Image (spheres, rainbow, N blue to C red):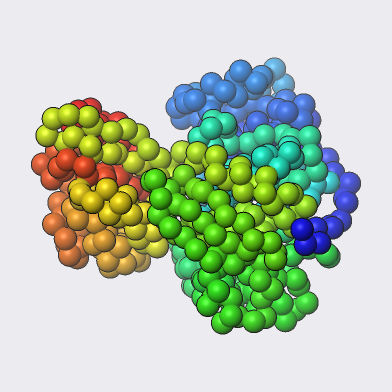
Amino acid sequence: MSDSTITGDSRTPGALPASVHMIGIGGAGMSGVARLLLARGVTVSGSDMKDSRAVVGLRAMGATVAIGHDAANLDASGSLPEAVVVSFAAIPETNPELARAKELGISVLKRSDVLGMLLEGNRALLIAGTHGKTSTTSMSVAALQAAGMDPSFAVGGLMSKAGVNAHHGTGDVFVAEADESDASLLTYSPQVAVVTNIEPDHLDFFGTADKYYAVFDAFAGRIVDGGALVVCAEDEHAAALGERAAAAGIRVLGYGGPEALEAHPALEAGGVLHGWTAHGGGARVEATILGDRITFELRQPGRHMALNALASLVGGRLVDADLVRMARGLSEFSGVRRRFDYHGRIDGGDFDGARVYDDYAHHPTEVRAVLGAARELVDEAGTGNVVAVFQPHLYSRTKAFSVEFAEALSLADRVIVLDVFGAREEPEPGVDGALIARDVTVPTIFEPHFTSTPGRVREVAGPNDVILTIGAGSVTMLADEILRELG
């Protein structure tokens, strides 16, 4: 194997609070940090608006969790916490627990601040980018575990096989997503930083595309001495970031097809994708990773997943994991929940052979990728249509990208567009699902009534179809409802 180990700073771990109260503890990111804190011996309490599997799991680990937000929750564990942890994007200033913490002078930390403390003293392998962070982070974890390492990790979704989103490992490698949505990735100083792609998003926070691009340059500048940046050479802005970083003296490795790497000679060839073939609902991948040739299988369809796999292998080699064992781990990787997540198949009847999947895609590029993967399944079967059930996420994103969403959804054969899942945003006049539906060029239904959706799917679906529920909101609840409706 090539000599490719990254040696970074060995820093003294930061002092974690002895006790914390986490507002919104059941969220994907917050629950993962809570698991890590509990494993480190920190007293953890928290609150959320609803009970969930994540909350049940945290209680089993020793956390005190209240359902509903109330100022009294702050000392539900028997005493006031040293710090209150929030995700500022989701927790309003009027939250009674946050208001009481400020009145009492209790330190208020962002989730990213705490994750930064947890990263201290480890070799941090961080995955950033507009799309693909969760899948690439999860692949990296699976690959390193297969190579005999026991990394700590924090993933923005549940790994299907393990059923968890975080783990306190015994090794010195820590794998985590670096979220750019509120610039919180600038909290971290990685040994290895992977950037999957860069495409303007979260403009409600950044304001302009240039400011969004700039946060990735600042992140590259935080890589420790002796570290490396890994970028996708097939993505225009990620490759440009790599070229700027290389000019600044940072070691930069690119991954992608041979043509993309040849077009960016400033990037060291970290991962070359020689061949990718749809196979058995997944793919067969041929690649060279830091000079070593490897062929392996993936269970996930889509060329974008092959690129994510290359990113995880390059990152893994840079923290000295064995390539062959990592590739074997990727061949056994069963995916991440809500990332082309298989829910079931209809056997018999009018919809015989139809399959239902669920995906978190909530940006036009992500929608395009997931529909492309669905098309591979249909093409491989030789029959059936792709049916997309899409729920827009955020009014600001719907307004900014309505045309691009319509273009992406037009890759399906039949489309049902739901109304906008507003999440933290208030409704905006004239911005709804119909704004997207009217520009889709294939047969499309705008269905503003959530509970009517399974019946609408029944109207347009047929045998051997691939049906996808797509979006970052409540649409995920419809996947099993659609199965029941069709079955």
| 311 is higher (above) or lower (below) than 110 | below
Residue visible at 38% across and 46% down in the picture: 281
**Residue 150 locus on image (x, y percent):** 73, 37
Residue visible at 29% across and 39% down in the picture: 356
Which image quarter holds the C terminus? Answer: top left
Residue visible at 47% across and 68% down in the picture: 200
Whether residue 367 can be seen here: no
**Residue 420 locus on image (x, y percent):** 29, 50
**Residue 188 locus on image (x, y percent):** 72, 55
Which image quarter holds the N terminus? Answer: bottom right
Residue visible at 26% across and 61% down in the picture: 411
**Residue 93, image quadrant:** top right
Question: How many numbered marks, from 0 up?
Answer: 0
Whether residue 159 can be seen here: yes
In the shown orientation, is residue 97 left or right of residue 7? Answer: left
| 174 is higher (above) or lower (below) than 262 | above
* 128 or 88, nearer to the observer: 128
* 412 or 119, nearer to the observer: 412
**Residue 473, image quadrant:** top left
**Residue 135 locus on image (x, y percent):** 52, 49
**Residue 147, image quadrant:** top right
In the shown orientation, is residue 98 left or right of residue 404? Answer: right
* 355 or 383, nearer to the observer: 383
